[in-house]
Image (cartoon, rainbow, N blue to C red):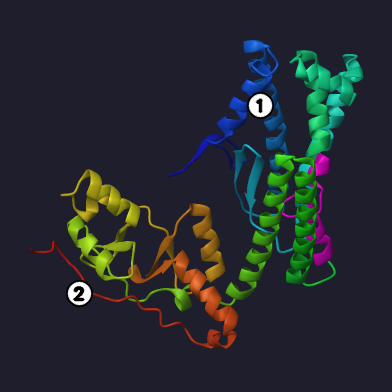
Amino acid sequence: MNWSIPLLRVRGIEIKVHTTFALILVWAAYYWGFGTDAGSRGALFGVTAIILLFVCVVLHELGHALTAQRYGIVVHDITLLPIGGVARIEVPENPREELWIALAGPAVNVVIAVVLIAVGALLSATSLLMPADLSVTMREAKWSGLLAYLTLANIALVLFNLIPAFPLDGGRVLRALLAIRQDYRRATETAARIGQAVALGFGLLGFLALDFFLIVIAVFVWFGAEAERQQVSNKGTLDNLTVGQAMSRNPAVLVPEDPLERAVELTLSTAQADFPVVSSDGRVVGLLSADDLLRGVRDQPSATVGVAMRRDVLQAAASEQLVDVQQRAAVAGARTLVVIEDDRLAGFLTIADIGEAFRLFAIRPELLAAPLTNEAPQPQQSLGPASG
């Protein structure tokens, strides 16, 4: 299930909001409404403040995304979460490009803060920029404090994001600066270790101060740094692997006319969970995933595979680089791909296959000289409805 709702597109970049984003709006309404005894006025104030803050977050992420586009780097989308925004951007190979892309987001917040300060000066609202005054004003849900709140929030976004820890912008800035002078993988390892040291510091401060939010940030930074390190490590291994070396060469298949009972039989008798669906001439026409099968058995037990299958199948070629296909699958949220050669099914690739190939070749890199013999158990291929 896709938990993100599309909002708009900016230069081809889809901006989405995750359904969990509603949680922070509910919190804001409660905090400034019931928490301040301001009632509905406070709830409206809180929701407005959070929405305006996340407009600044979107502009921050667009700073990254549009700069990446200038370098010809693929930008997939931007998603708003309760903890902030995430722009999915392909990692640039040039460290100088990564440096400017990472700095572009905080630079946008600097510009926003400067503009808001100028507006505050024109409106004689600069006195509200003092934290003590702002705390009182915001606690009372006064609209006069909103300008100062957004100003300080943008300054805080700049300072927070420049902390040298993945997945924050500062971690990417650090990695880019290191990668200018040393190997990319080594630069990532160093930046990740620094990021995890920062995370430990955050966590310790959080426990000492009983600050749950700081602990959450520590966990976020720790796992973000580890994920970045692992991704680069995996890429170094997978760069030399092709789809043909990791795919299953003889997957069990179905045809659209098969009853769902046939898919159940194959699920129980093979190691597969998903099944390519082919026509009588061997062309791939769909994919029956485990989720599709369960839904079909529950809602339409007498239906055929053709009714329950999905037709938007992610495809790959045996000669493609495995790391490229892995990224494509991650973007599409797919766990299974079909491998096509000459318009016919040549193999079957799952996320589990990719993980298995990585583990194998990380231990035995000399095996790269030969393809894997990854063959799924092949029962008798079904070319029509199964008879009782």
The kind of secondary structure element at disc 2 is loop
Q: Residue at x 21, y 64 (%)?
A: 265
Report the disc number at residue 158: none
Q: Position of residue 71 (x, y in %)?
A: 71, 54
**Image: magenta residue range:** 158-179
103 horizontally vs 276: left or right? right
Separation (CA) of disc 2 from disc 1: 58 Å
Q: Position of residue 174 (x, y in %)?
A: 82, 58
The kind of secondary structure element at disc 1 is helix
Q: Residue at x 55, y 65 (%)?
A: 324
| The C terminus: image quadrant | bottom left
Count numbered badges in the picture. 2
Pick the front one: 137 or 123: 137
Q: Residue at x 27, y 76 (%)?
A: 378
Tell me if mark 1 has few (under 14), some (14-19) or many (20+) residues whose alpha carbon lies within 10 angstroms of its own: some
Report the disc number at residue 51: 1
Q: Earlier in the sequence, mark 2 or mark 1?
A: 1
What's under tag 1, amino acid-wise? Ile
179 horizontally vs 272: left or right? right
Tell me if mark 2 has few (under 14), some (14-19) or many (20+) residues whose alpha carbon lies within 10 angstroms of its own: few
Residue 118's place in the image compared with 260, above or below, is: above
| The N terminus: image quadrant | top left
Q: Is residue 216 visible?
A: yes
